């Protein structure tokens, strides 16, 4: 009896599929090549670390002299980032639904949407900035549009990934009542994915604030310009002040995200 | 008329498991039938095939004489509205309220989502949801998040959601497995009341043979994916039932 | 040739990028270089005793000097020519940010930097002992104010109150240059103009009439004309020539070494300039030449920085 | 009886908490302010769109003349990105475990780790590049280190968010056997989070490739330099070619991600 | 000696639900006790308090005379090793194999994770896992992903995982709810065999009163969170049992 059952014992290792082996070999060789590139040598590291501290030291203490101008820029950036991200998130949700295996109406639509989202993400910000400056002119609107595109590229991808991970049981339960696809989505996919959507969306807000540099490109000002100017004139203490200010906002956004998620997880 | 007709349905999973082998049976409208069988005999798989979540490897299934075996989702949807399911593991939307979960049972009748969402549903629907909850004894827990219920309470919510749907054909997968004896009996009574009064059709998976014998007018038995029993209650002996679980299975370890 | 191979082995991918070009162009470089190389070697031997502190490899960074961006990605020929001429191994780094270049020099992570005038001022400010030793003189290197052909602006006075697109803060021809022109003409930058630093969007913004005036390097004007044809844009004002781009030496380098390099570079300037030109469209360098450079050449830049209020600490 | 049960019917709307109301008001007012900033006017949009097509047209057809050099740079970038992201992901997992509510050994550790990860993310790439150039010199190593930091800032955050969402049932089942925290993590958190971790990690690879610009910052070459040069010399057709090449890689990485996830979801 | 001792345990959830009210009982080592009660009577909550996943609002719980009520996780861990649990909803790691899930039962004894991971576990452990699976009749499904099992099969895996743990005290929450009659009976026999032969202690939640009366030497009954029954099987009448579910509850809708 025990013998009989032992014949069913899974082997310790199963022969992996050829494609898996091939994938692993490719990964390892690329990784190894990359490592040789890195050219790691530790002889200079110690002086390097001393240098690094010297550099960091030059930024201390942070210089608060321009704090009111900086705060103003931050406030402005925050507003624009908020508007752009809100629209981006709102657009991302339907796009993600079209791009997910379990909610897409058709696999062709899915592939096309995915490709589109990847494209939005791959085309650099600079190009988007150019395109929007040309079509709507300089100013916050071009910035908002760039942020919207950025947000869709990011959020639609992550929303879709989460949607595909949602257990299918509850959705089937709704489907079995004769619910339409839209009903299943509103009744099961969205509530179950909600904690994750909140996290991703608020991360997107944060991301938009951090990448505020593009606002400068389109002549919309904001904290990005402040930061890059501080660098150009090598005012590291002022740069540090700006980074700290951004960090405060970033952490605040993260706290909001946590608080909302705690409720709905 | 046959509410449900299963013709030589075979289901082989991708890994080669034969969950169903040429199973055929008919259920007439207004009948209340119990489906029995050992663990892994293919009962839930049968239900999944009927409700279209699995496609049979071969064979056909008819609902009200319409073939549904390979119907697209879009085409199947209008029919699904009339089929109420209770799932073996409830499948509630865990982070929504009990009330909202029950309201969702009416999704088939109300294609506009707002009409079945708790804040915007009509007074009628909301009251109906409360009535359904009341029938399974959970009215007082309507506002609770559904993952803050006990196991049996969750199963009752699943039953209430099914009731909300006003189905013509009920497929209940072990609907009383987690219920206490009194509640279990009451739910069975409820289901058979529906069959008797409203001439609906119920196909119910059970493991409790006594309850099966008490309620089911007709019993269907599966063993290792094959139909081995299909008869009126009166023709079935205790032995028949025992052999359903023991026949051809020497030891527990051979159960598929 | 030996050093060239070594360097190639060390930085294999760089070779990938440029191998085809190198193969084609290096032959005549080498043949024309032979005699000079020999003399250089002789001189080196005589000074053997002093060379102990000379570096074995020269770490060279190019911070993407305006108009020489092509060198950033096709530096193979230039690097090899430099190796041939200097008879030393060269590690070349294309650094896309001048702040990083300057900081690397400050912390002795590079020995030599090719930098624009504005960058040099910045670097020199952080590393006061750094100094330029060779400048690249080019015929057309100045800032210009560009307007649309059909606009009514004729003189600098006309554009008071308009919006002017410039590049990024600290750019030589796209910010410091034009700003210093306006300052020297007596305008108040903050109140007389609406200056927008638009970096790489500036040209599209101007073409699209988002701003009235574009203040940038003259090279941009030629490019715009090349793209859209004559008759669209008009030069409103051209500034004086800007200081030269410079090869900047780290203070850590022995001075005699830098002198040696300076001599060799000036002697071999045609080869080196050719190797820069090989890579593409640096046509304005066709009339360029190496000159020895001094810190004082950049005082005008410094003044501009000061008046702009972009003073360093 | 029905009446009695109706008294339990949840109200349609519950009075939201004051803090929720405050949050919503702040959001709406910031959003409204941002919108007025945007200064949306559609009068110029039409000429703008014509201009935009003219601009886009200037990039067509993509110029494949430098394709071999570009591919080389891409290959190089890919290797470096792979190495950096791999280390980043490997470091992110333990950091995420320290930063998640349900796996952190102590709430102080959690808060500190979270803050640290936010800081890694908020400090701009340029500063990281400076720091690493100072400490290890110019070249690929500095690039790899910057990518590692970037990856941690992103992955640790997303890993942690996912870990917090994992159902607690299976973990409790392992805990009830007397398993150590590490056992619970390896036996339940990691397998259950695996599909999500794969998606996030491969997104990070993609992200590193797209942000290859930082390699240019530290003099490590790669596709970023190619792209930024193409822009400064206004060769938009060449830039388009590069974007297409990056897109191909991005989509390939996404396919790999999908394939792996399909197995383990 | 008392394997388990519950002293005036009260559990009030955050929303005010009184799941347990001053429940006290003792279970001696080597006893096999059945816990009965209507849905929502607090049985699972009792188990969660014992295993430390919920902290009682008041009262104390002792295991082998050691108080564990407010023990930190770290301090409780060594004790947990000896408490085997079967959860009401199984809690398998759904995307791992059945075999791996069972092996994880040995995590308490083997702190090194590799020692309980399928590819690296010792031959001994691997064979033991197969033996445990065999005891619940699932040896042939060892390689299957655990979410590709039928409901009853999943429950058996959960039981096998508990067996793998070699616990001294077994807390089984409706371990046979999804099992067919034969398998359910066999699992109960298995549990009571363990009690008899190895002098282990079993506390088992059941809804099937007949099986409870057949196996449990002693029965404990909860009603609305209060202990209303605690006696030897022989002293309990059918009426007592019925009143456990009916007493004080006029209608189903009043069940808490
Ligand atoms: N996705 C799947 N892949 C492979 N085999 C499966 C899958 N789902 C179920 N099975 C197998 O098919 C058989 C029938 O399963 P099914 O769920 O229909 O059983 P059941 O009769 O409902 O049992 P229970 O009473 O335990 O619920 C079982 O042996 C099961 O292991
Ligand atoms: N997290 C929670 N918050 C609030 N109330 C809860 C929570 N969990 C359980 N309850 C309530 O506590 C009571 C006891 O639940 P418990 O799960 O212990 O019941 P049970 O006896 O196991 O029932 P069943 O037989 O249905 O499994 C129930 O009324 C339930 O609704
Ligand atoms: Mg089943
Ligand atoms: Mg329970």
Image (cartoon, coloured by chain):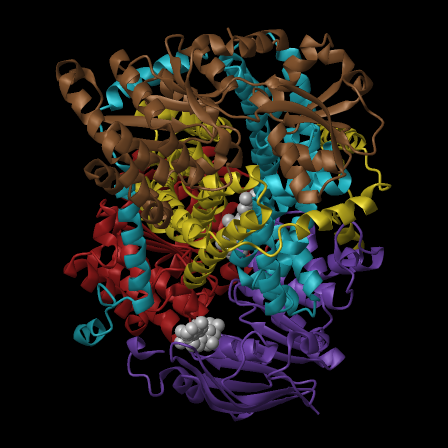
Chain colours: A cyan, B purple, C brown, D yellow, E red
Q: Residue at x 23, y 69 (%)?
A: A9
Point out residue C70 in the picture as x, y percentages from the top left corner. 47, 38
In this view of the protein, which residue sits in the foreground, D158 or C161? C161
Q: Residue at x 24, y 42 (%)?
A: C9
Q: Classify residue D179 as left or right of residue A179.
A: left
- Quarter holding the C terminus of chain D? bottom left
Above or below — where is C83 with respect to B185? Answer: above
Q: Classify residue B164 as left or right of residue B48.
A: right
- Quarter holding the N terminus of chain D? bottom right
Q: Is residue E69 visible?
A: no
Q: Residue at x 71, y 10 (%)?
A: C185
Q: Is residue E149 visible?
A: yes
In this view of the protein, which residue sits in the foreground, B187 or E164? E164
Point out residue A95 in the picture as x, y percentages from the top left corner. 65, 55
Asked where in the image residue C147 lies, by quadrant, the reply is top right
Above or below — where is B41 with respect to E72? Answer: below
Point out residue B105 in the picture as x, y percentages from the top left corner. 70, 64
Q: Residue at x 32, y 23 (%)?
A: D135
Point out residue A265 in the picture as x, y percentages from the top left corner. 56, 44
């Amino acid at each position: 009896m025990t013998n009989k059952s032992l014949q069913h014992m899974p082997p310790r290792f199963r022969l992996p599929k050829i494609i898996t082996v091939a994938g692993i070999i490719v990964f390892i060789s690329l990784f190894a090549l990359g490592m040789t590139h890195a050219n790691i040598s530790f002889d200079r590291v110690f002086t390097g670390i001393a240098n690094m501290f010297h550099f960091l030291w030059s930024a201390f203490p942070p210089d608060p002299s321009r704090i009111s101008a900086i705060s103003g820029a931050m406030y402005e950036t925050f507003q624009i980032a908020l508007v752009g991200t809100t629209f981006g998130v709102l657009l991302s949700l339907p796009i993600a639904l079209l791009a997910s295996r379990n909610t897409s109406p058709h696999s062709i639509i899915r592939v096309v949407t995915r490709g589109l989202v990847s494209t939005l993400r791959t085309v650099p910000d600079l190009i988007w900035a150019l395109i929007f400056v040309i079509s709507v002119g300089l100013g916050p609107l071009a910035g908002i549009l760039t942020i919207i595109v950025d947000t869709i590229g990011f959020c639609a991808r992550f929303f879709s990934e989460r949607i595909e991970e949602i257990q299918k049981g509850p959705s089937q339960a709704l489907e079995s009542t004769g619910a339409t696809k839209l009903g299943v989505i509103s009744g099961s996919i969205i509530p179950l994915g909600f904690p994750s959507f909140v996290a991703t969306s608020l991360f997107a807000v944060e991301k938009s604030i951090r990448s505020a540099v593009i606002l400068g490109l389109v002549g919309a000002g904001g904290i990005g310009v402040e930061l890059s100017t501080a660098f150009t004139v090598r005012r590291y203490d002022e740069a540090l002040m700006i980074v700290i200010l951004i960090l405060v906002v970033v952490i605040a956004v993260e706290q909001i995200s946590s608080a909302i998620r705690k409720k709905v997880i | 008329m046959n509410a449900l007709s299963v013709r030589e349905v075979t289901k082989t999973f991708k890994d080669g498991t034969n969950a169903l082998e040429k199973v055929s049976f008919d259920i007439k409208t207004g009948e209340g039938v119990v489906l029995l069988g050992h663990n892994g005999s293919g009962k839930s798989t049968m239900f999944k095939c009927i409700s279209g979540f699995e496609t049979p490897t071969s064979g056909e299934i008819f609902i009200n004489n319409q073939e549904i075996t390979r119907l697209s989702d879009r085409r199947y949807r209008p029919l699904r509205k009339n089929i109420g399911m209770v799932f073996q593991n409830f499948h509630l939307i865990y982070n929504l309220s009990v009330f909202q979960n029950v309201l969702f049972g009416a999704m088939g009748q109300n294609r506009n989502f707002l009409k079945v969402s708790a804040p915007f549903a009509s007074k009628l629907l909301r009251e109906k949801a409360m009535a359904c909850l009341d029938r399974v004894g959970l009215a007082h827990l309507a506002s609770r998040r559904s993952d803050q219920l006990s196991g049996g309470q969750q199963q009752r919510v699943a039953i209430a959601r099914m009731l909300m749907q006003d189905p013509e054909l009920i497929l209940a997968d072990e609907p009383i497995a987690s219920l206490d004896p009194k509640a279990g009996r009451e739910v069975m009574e409820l289901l058979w009341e529906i069959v008797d009064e409203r001439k609906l059709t119920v196909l119910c998976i059970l493991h409790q043979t006594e309850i099966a014998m008490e309620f089911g007018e007709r019993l269907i038995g599966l063993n290792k994916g094959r139909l081995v029993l299909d008869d009126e209650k009166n023709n079935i002996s205790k032995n028949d039932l025992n052999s359903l679980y023991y026949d051809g299975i020497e030891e527990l370890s051979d159960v598929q | 040739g030996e050093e060239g191979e070594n360097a190639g082995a060390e930085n294999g991918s760089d070779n990938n990028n440029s191998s085809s070009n190198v193969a084609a162009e290096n032959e005549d470089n080498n043949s024309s270089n032979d005699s000079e190389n020999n003399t250089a070697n002789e001189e080196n031997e005589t000074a053997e005793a002093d060379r102990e502190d000379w570096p074995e490899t020269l770490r060279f960074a190019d911070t993407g000097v305006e108009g020489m961006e092509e060198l950033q990605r096709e530096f193979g020929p230039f690097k090899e020519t430099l190796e041939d001429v200097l008879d030393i191994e060269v590690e070349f780094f294309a650094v896309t940010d001048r702040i990083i270049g300057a900081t690397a020099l400050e912390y002795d992570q590079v020995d030599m930097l090719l930098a624009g005038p504005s960058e040099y001022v910045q670097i020199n400010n952080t590393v006061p002992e750094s100094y330029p030793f060779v400048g690249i003189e080019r015929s057309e290197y100045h800032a210009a104010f560009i307007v649309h052909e059909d606009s009514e602006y004729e003189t600098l006075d006309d554009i008071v109150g308009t919006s002017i697109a410039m590049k990024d803060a600290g750019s030589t021809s796209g910010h410091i240059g034009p700003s210093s022109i306006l300052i020297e003409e007596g305008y108040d930058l903050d109140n007389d103009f609406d200056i927008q630093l638009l970096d790489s969007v500036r040209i599209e913004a101007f073409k699209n009439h988002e701003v009235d005036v574009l203040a940038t390097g003259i090279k941009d004007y030629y490019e715009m004309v090349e793209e859209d044809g004559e008759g669209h844009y008009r030069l409103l004002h051209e500034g004086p020539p800007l200081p030269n781009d410079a090869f900047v030496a780290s203070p850590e380098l022995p001075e005699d070494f830098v002198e040696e390099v300076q001599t060799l570079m000036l002697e071999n300037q045609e080869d080196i300039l050719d190797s820069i030109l090989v890579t593409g469209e640096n046509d304005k360098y066709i009339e360029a030449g190496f000159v020895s450079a001094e810190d004082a050449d950049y005082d005008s830049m410094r003044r501009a920085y000061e008046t702009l209020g972009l003073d360093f600490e």
